[in-house]
Image (tube, rainbow, N blue to C red):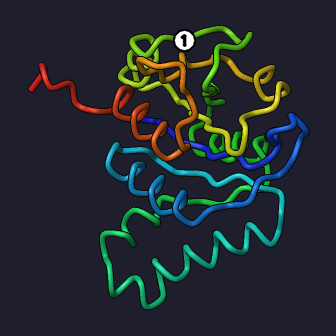
């Protein structure tokens, strides 16, 4: 499986739909790394241009992979070893392209349906199983800015429940989506 996951902190919207760089939360680093390890993701990219936020992510990474945390909790070490810090979406795509010798298919996520070409979970899962190089991109704050959708190859269908409330944490949405795309089908066991 050649699936990569990115958590984009810039450019994203705030609640007033202004373009911002959102702050990294350490919960996201831990939980998304654990998701990546569980579902066989190649690399979990934390994407931010802010140097202080990059250093925060690297400090967490060092603590759990080479510091006291590596000895204290080896399973967290295994998961966080999949995390990489990138200054931009473009740099992330370049790194994947260099590793894989082909540009990844960029699949973006959003809580609403937007203009990018839509992609169902069945179609996305088929792409993952066909061993396509994929960058699955999640946004933070109030979501990805329109320019990111314009760069995307596909927009994955949103996660929808049975109510009109649709504001999951990125960790929750990522867990649901990764299980749908890379999880074992209980009927196939």
Side of 124 relative to 110 (left or right):
left
Locate residue 63, reporting x and y percent.
51, 83
Side of 38 relative to 17 (left or right):
left
Q: Of residues 88 and 97, which is closer to you in this image?
A: 88
Locate residue 142, reporting x and y percent.
73, 38
Q: Of residues 170 and 1, which is closer to you in this image?
A: 170
Q: Of residues 74 and 113, which is closer to you in this image?
A: 113
Side of 7 relative to 78 (left or right):
right
Can you say which quadrant of the picture contains the N terminus? top left
Label 1, secondary structure: give it: strand
Q: Which residue is found at the position 54% from the left and 57% from the top?
A: 28
Q: Which residue is found at the position 62% from the left and 62% from the top?
A: 25
> As displayed, is residue 153 above or below residue 85?
above
> As displayed, is residue 107 above or below residue 8?
above
Side of 61 relative to 51 (left or right):
left
**Crowding near pointer 1: few (<14 within 10 Å), some, many (20+)?**
some
Please, which residue is most extreme toward the bottom here? 68
Please, which residue is most extreme toward the left here? 189
Count of all numbered marks drawn on residues in the image: 1
Locate residue 8, reporting x and y percent.
70, 45
> As displayed, is residue 121 above or below residue 73?
above
Locate residue 39, reporting x and y percent.
34, 43
Q: Which residue is found at the position 77% from the left and 53% from the top?
A: 22
Residue at the disc numbered 1 = 119
Q: Quadrant of residue 187?
A: top left
Can you say which quadrant of the picture contains the C terminus? top left
Q: Quadrant of residue 100?
A: top right
Q: Which residue is found at the position 53% from the left and 51% from the top?
A: 44
């Amino acid at each position: 499986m050649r699936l990569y996951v990115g958590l984009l902190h810039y450019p994203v919207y705030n609640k007033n739909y202004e373009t911002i760089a959102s702050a990294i939360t350490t919960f996201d680093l831990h939980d998304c790394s654990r998701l990546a390890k569980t579902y066989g993701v190649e690399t979990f990219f934390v994407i931010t241009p802010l140097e202080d936020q990059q250093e925060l992510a690297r400090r967490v990474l060092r603590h759990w992979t080479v510091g006291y945390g590596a000895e204290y909790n080896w399973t967290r070490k295994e998961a966080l070893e999949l995390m990489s810090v990138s200054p931009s979406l473009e740099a992330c795509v370049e790194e994947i392209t260099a590793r894989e010798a082909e540009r990844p298919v960029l699949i973006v996520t959003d809580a609403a349906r937007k203009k990018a070409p839509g992609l169902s979970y069945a179609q996305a899962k088929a792409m993952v199983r066909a061993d396509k190089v994929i960058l699955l991109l999640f946004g933070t704050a109030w979501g990805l800015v329109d320019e990111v959708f314009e760069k995307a190859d596909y927009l994955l269908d949103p996660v929808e429940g049975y109510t009109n409330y649709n504001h999951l944490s990125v960790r929750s949405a990522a867990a649901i989506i990764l299980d749908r795309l890379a999880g074992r089908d209980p009927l196939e066991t």
